Image: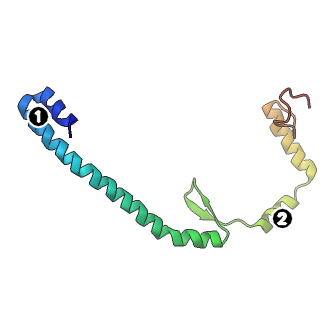
């Protein structure tokens, strides 16, 4: 409201000042209307998506931020998958990850000197 007339006056004299006043007034009306509209749209989206979110949570689904979708997971399936892996296999994978980092498996963050 103030900056536009000043900039207009610097660049175009009196006619630039008048144009700046018009632009400032238009911006003073338009920007708040746009802000309120965007806020209202977001509230409506939230209200519209709430029933789906509640149902998905009730069904045990989780929200994936990357794909922006709900996904199902089963603790039973996880238990079966993990049950098929032996402790030796888990430790071997941990050792490989640790070697890639230059540490020892199972001791990440326990000792700063890496004595173990």
Could you say whether the residue bearing mark 2 is in a helix, strand or loop? helix
Between disc 2 and disc 1, whose residue precedes? Answer: 1
Image coordinates for residue 72, horizontal then vertical, percent: 67, 66
Could you say whether the residue bearing mark 1 is in a helix, strand or loop? helix
Identify the residue at image location x=87%, y=40%.
Answer: 106
Q: CA distance from mark 2 to mark 1?
A: 75 Å
Which residue occupies the foreground of this view, 64 or 30? 30
Tag shown at residue 17: 1
Which image quadrant: the C terminus?
top right
Image coordinates for residue 5, horizontal then vertical, percent: 16, 35
Residue at label 2?
Answer: 80
Identify the residue at image location x=46%, y=68%.
Answer: 47
Residue 31 lies left or right of residue 67; in this view the side is left
Vertical order, 23 against 74 (above or below): above
Vertical order, 61 against 85 (above or below): below
Residue 13 lies left or right of residue 99; in this view the side is left
Q: How many residues crowd mark 2 within 10 Å: few (<14), some (14–19), many (20+)?
A: few
Which image quadrant: the N terminus?
top left
Residue 30 lies left or right of residue 89; in this view the side is left
Vertical order, 115 against 53 (above or below): above
Image coordinates for residue 90, horizontal then vertical, percent: 87, 49
Image coordinates for residue 50, horizontal then vertical, percent: 52, 69
Q: Quadrant of residue 22?
A: top left
Residue 21 lies left or right of residue 115; in this view the side is left
């Amino acid at each position: 409201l103030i900056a536009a007339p000043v900039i207009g006056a610097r660049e175009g004299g009196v006619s630039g000042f008048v144009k700046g006043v018009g632009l400032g007034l238009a911006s003073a009306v338009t920007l708040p209307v746009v802000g309120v509209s965007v806020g209202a749209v977001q509230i409506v989206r939230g209200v519209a998506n709430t029933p789906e979110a509640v149902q998905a949570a009730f069904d045990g689904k989780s929200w994936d931020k990357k794909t922006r979708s709900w996904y199902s997971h089963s603790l039973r399936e996880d238990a079966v998958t993990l049950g098929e892996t032996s402790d030796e296999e888990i430790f071997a994978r941990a050792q490989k990850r640790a070697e890639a980092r230059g540490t020892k498996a199972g001791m990440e963050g326990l000792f700063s000197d890496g004595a173990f």
